[in-house]
Amino acid sequence: MRKNNLRKLIQERKPIINGWLQIPHSFSAEVMAKQGYDSLTIDMQHGVIDYPNALQMLQAISTTDVIPMARVNWNEPGQIMKILDAGAYGIICPMVSNRKEAEAFVQACLYPPKGYRSFGPIRGLLYGGADYGKYANDEILKFAMIETKEALSNLDEIMSTEGLDGIYIGPADLSLAVGSEPSFDIPESSPVFKVILEILEHAKKNNIIPGIHNMSPEYAEKMIKLGFKLVTVGADQRYMSAGAKAAVDKIKKTSSKDSSKTY
């Protein structure tokens, strides 16, 4: 089976640089895949991407060595299994709030006896290889998103779930969970930053991969120095809009600033 190179990076104590895809097209996915990322995550939660889009995007990514991942829109076994069958090598699951939900997520990603994933890797066999079914449990990465108030009371219970590889912080929803405005690249003076550090320390204690969503490379570098092992930097949509806006503003001699707080 094709190896998941992200596991090798973690073993070598190197950070995973992850990109984010929201535009539902294979060509934009291919362009992003050529930029040197270690992995690319197809956002099926807040993006405008459906399953046929995701399939074509996975095909585009597979022309490179970039590891394909997906964020599903909910902790729903059918969707998790189907995108794994399409060839995703990692799943980010939103709104995991307790041990029971974490276990359900992990087991949906694993074939029996470790889980209850149904066998039918229609494209997984093409991408992963003929022995996909034998080794998929060892290669697929599973990240639970820590972003709810309930989750903050169950950090160790979630992170000690057998088979869970890592956690992923969505700063916007985490901000809402602690009563702040949704935001990214949280300043150190914010109470949300203290919560991020708490989550990070629990991940280190449980020896799993801590990941976080960032808007700027500078902030991502800061998170790596703190100990995060997977950092997402920006998104295809934001790079396109920011680049276009900068060009137009320069020609029109305007200085309006992109104040969007979305991905």
Image (spheres, helix red, strand yellow):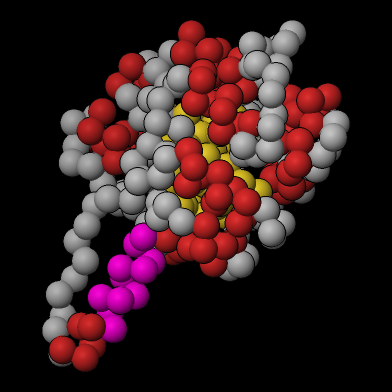
Q: Is 238 part of what is drawn in magenta?
A: yes
Looking at the image, which is closer to me, 162 or 263? 263
**Image: 207 above or below 36:** above
**Image: 222 above or below 93:** below
Q: In x, y percent, where is residue 164? A: 61, 23
Secondary structure predominantly adopted by residues drawn in magenta: helix
Stretch of the chain drawn in magenta: 237-247
Q: Quadrant of residue 83?
A: top right
Residue at position x 85%, y 35% from top?
130
Residue at position x 27%, y 50% from top?
262
In the rendered structure, the answer to whether residue 21 lies left or right of residue 87 reads left
Looking at the image, which is closer to me, 76 or 147? 76
How many discs appear?
0
In the rendered structure, the answer to whether residue 185 lies left or right of residue 61 reads left
Looking at the image, which is closer to me, 23 or 197? 23
Q: In x, y percent, where is residue 193? A: 34, 41
Point out the image quarter for the N terminus. Answer: top right
Q: Is 152 part of what is drawn in magenta?
A: no
Residue at position x 52%, y 57% from top?
26
In the rendered structure, the answer to whether residue 171 lies left or right of residue 96 reads left
Q: Is residue 60 visible?
A: yes
Q: Is residue 197 visible?
A: no
Q: In x, y percent, where is residue 77? A: 51, 18
Residue at position x 29%, y 41% from top?
172
Q: In x, y percent, where is residue 68? A: 61, 46
In the rendered structure, the answer to whether residue 2 lies left or right of residue 10 reads right
